[in-house]
Image (spheres, rainbow, N blue to C red):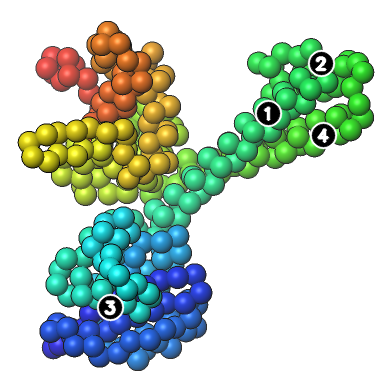
Amino acid sequence: MKVYYIGMDVHKKNISYCIKTKSGEIVSKGNIASNRASLRRWVRGLPKRWIGAMEATLFSGWIYDYLKPYALELKVANPQMLKAIIASKKKNDRVDAQKIADLLRCNLLPECYMAPEKIRELRRVLRYRNLMVREAVRMNNKMSGLFMEVGAVYSKKRLHGKKYFSDLLERVEDVPDSVIDLLRLSRASYEMFNRVQKKLMDALNHEPLIADRVKRLMTIDGVGEVTALTWVLEVGDPMRFGATGQAISYCGLCSAQRESAGKNHRGPISKQRNKHLQTVLIEAAKLAPHWNAQLAKVHEREVKKGNCNRATLAVARKLVSYMLAVDKRGTEFVQAAEAKAA
């Protein structure tokens, strides 16, 4: 039976589509509203056998989930690589949909990984939890700033404590009432953000879908709960990385490469990365050498070369290699010395 190829240019309010045959003949094209009712009416009129493709965007996830049961195959394109391929003088939604359909039927679509719906749901929760942590820190810093503005003496290390904060408000002198009100408001916000992030973290910890993977990753000295959760939910399926270098590149722990005419130039750390995973791994790499002797050796070796930031990146890359190996094997982490002894 004939298979049709559908390119979709997805936007917040509407979707431009183009349906083509294998030979490139346009069967149909047009626009539909970006809502489930319009998609339902549209998909019922499509040919029975079709393959679709769309660009990865903030709101393409629910469209992907809705259309996937109706398609033989549904693909999501990497937006960074797609821009380089379909760049042209004339560019609009209709043209973009046609070019995506052409890339799809010619098997040239720069496809990117689409995690299962449940993993994406948990990932959303984790990212929201991280937002709550950042907001809690922001409120704590704001309280510190307010005390400094009025010349109050306080201990920054103890400011997060509830009892210390209450006692401090009672004994500070010459502080305007407006500042006291702002401090209380900031404290209430800080406690609310803290409660929310703890509640979200507790929900993630009791999720059976990822509990075993997280537990195995935490057998690596220096890998904590947040690092393990972030790895599992941001990476999804570890088997999609054929080599450690691919995982390191995905995490944004290597520099951009430009090679031409036999000359190789390495630029700064590439911006094409998973920023959520990169941030957590860099923070973990700063503390991991204190808990892991192997990582401490890596850090010490790089520090001797005279660059602390490069040492942190080297530790982060080693962490990625450890976690990828554990996640792929599905077994707990064993140090090299212990493995030889066994």
Foreground: 312 or 226?
312
Give the mark nearest the N terminus, 1 or 3. 3
**Residue type (three-letter) at the residue carrying disc 3:** Gln
Residue lying at the far top of the rendered structure = 304
Q: Disc 2 on helix, strand or loop? A: loop
Labelled disc at residue 140:
1
Labelled disc at residue 224:
none
- How far is mark 1 from mark 3, CA to CA? 51 Å
Please state the horizontal and vertical placement of residue 139, each as a whole percent of the image. 69, 33
Q: Are marks 2 and 1 in contact (CB under 8 Å)?
A: no
Q: Disc 4 on helix, strand or loop? A: helix
Quarter location, residue 58: bottom left
Foreground: 339 or 22?
22
Q: Disc 3 on helix, strand or loop? A: helix
- How far is mark 2 from mark 3, CA to CA? 65 Å
Give the mark nearest the N terminus, 2 or 1. 1
Q: Are marks 1 and 4 in contact (CB under 8 Å)?
A: no
Relative to residue 125, is residue 100 depicted above or below?
below
The residue that mark 3 highlights is 98
- How far is mark 3 from mark 4, CA to CA? 55 Å
| Disc 2 versus disc 1: nearer the observer | 2
Mark 4 neighbour density, 10 Å: few (under 14) some (14–19) many (20 or more): some
The residue that mark 4 highlights is 182
**Residue type (three-letter) at the residue carrying disc 4:** Leu
Mark 2 neighbour density, 10 Å: few (under 14) some (14–19) many (20 or more): some
Labelled disc at residue 152:
2
Mark 3 neighbour density, 10 Å: few (under 14) some (14–19) many (20 or more): many
Location of the C terminus (image quadrant): top left
- Please give left or right for residue 40 compared with residue 6 in the image: right
| Disc 1 versus disc 3: nearer the observer | 3
Give the mark nearest the N terminus, 1 or 4. 1
- Residue 224 visible from this viewpoint: yes
